[in-house]
Image: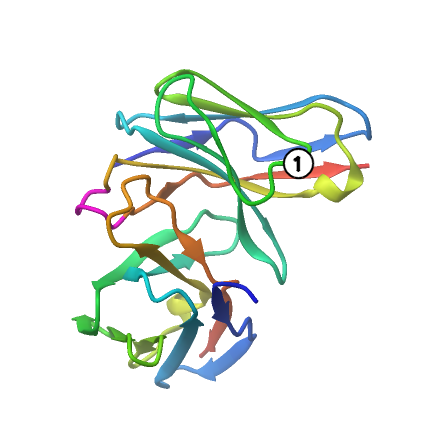
Amino acid sequence: QKEVEQDPGPLSVPEGAIVSLNCTYSNSAFQYFMWYRQYSRKGPELLMYTYSSGNKEDGRFTAQVDKSSKYISLFIRDSQPSDSATYLCAMSERGSTLGRLYFGRGTQLTVWP
Amino acid sequence: DVKVTQSSRYLVKRTGEKVFLECVQDMDHENMFWYRQDPGLGLRLIYFSYDVKMKEKGDIPEGYSVSREKKERFSLILESASTNQTSMYLCASSLLGGSDPNTGELFFGEGSRLTVL
C-alpha cells in the first residue's frame, strides 16, 4: 500500500463548478500537507500548504486536513478553464529537514467552458 | 524567482547508451532531487542530495547514478539506458528545512522527457 493514495481521475467539470480533490494517507507522522499544481508539459508548482489539521483558504482555493481520518482535501470554487491541470497532494513528516515529500499520483482535472 | 533549469526538454536515445540529464538551480538551495513521473504511478524519487558530493538513494535508484560536484548542479546518469527508463524526469531543489521550517517546499524544473528506443 502506498503511503499516499489519490484518485487519478480524470475529472471533468463545467466552468463555475465546485471541485473537490482528495487524498488519504497511512503515516500518522505526516504533519505538513501540500497541494501542487502541474500544467501540461510543465513542472509542478506549490499551490497551498497546511500544517497539521484545519482549513486554509486562498482566494478560490481551500485546503482541509483531517488528521484523525488521515484525509486531506482541496476545494476549488467557481472553477475556471485555467484551473485545468494535474493536482498532486504531498506530505512530509514533522522535523524533516531534507525536504523529502511523499506524493500522491495526481488527479487530472479539466474545466470546460 | 527560483529557477531550476533542466538542460534538455526532449531526448531520444537508444538502448545501451549512456545518458546524462543536467539540472542547475540559481537560488543556493542545499537540497536537490531527481524524480521520474509516469502515468498512473505519479512522482517517484530516484536520488536526492543535501550537500555537495553527498547523495542518498530514493525509492527507485536501480539503473541510475547521480553526481553533485557543485552546489548548484545535480546530474542524473543512466549508465546503460533501457526502454523501461522511458519517462519524464523532473529535477527539484529546496532550502535546507524549506522556506518555512520543515515544509520542504520543492521548486521543480520543467522536466526532461526521455524516450529510449
| In this rendering, position of residue B81 left or right of residue A95 | right
Q: Nearer the viewer, residue A11 or A4?
A: A4
Direction top: furthest residue: B69
Which residue is painted at 46% across and 56% down in the image?
A39
Q: Residue under mark 1: which chain is it in?
A: B
Query: What residue span does the magenta drawing correspond to?
Result: B98-103
Q: What quarter of the picture does the C terminus of chain B occupy?
A: top right
Q: Residue furthest front?
A: A28
Image coords of residue B54 (percent x, y): 42, 22
In the rendered picture of this protein, how many numbered marks are placed on residues? 1
Q: Is residue A34 left or right of residue B87?
A: left
Q: Is residue A79 magenta?
A: no
- Label 1's element? loop
Residue drawn at (60%, 59%), measured in percent from left and top? B41
* A18, A57: nearer the viewer: A57
Image quadrant for the N terminus of chain B? top left
Say which residue label 1 marks.
B62
Q: Is residue B6 positioned above or below A57 on the image?
A: above
Residue A38 coordinates in the image, percent (x, y): 44, 56
Rendered image coloring scheme? rainbow
As rendered, which of A65 and B11 lies closer to the eye? Answer: A65
Residue in the picture at 47% in, 48% down: A42
- Amino acid carrying label 1: it is Glu
Q: Give coordinates of residue A111: x percent, y percent.
A: 45, 76
Q: Main secondary structure of the magenta part?
A: loop
Give the class, few, some or many, for how many residues have Cα within 10 Å of label 1's Cα (few <14, many ≥20).
Answer: few
Q: Is residue B101 magenta?
A: yes
Q: Is residue A65 above or below residue A45?
A: below
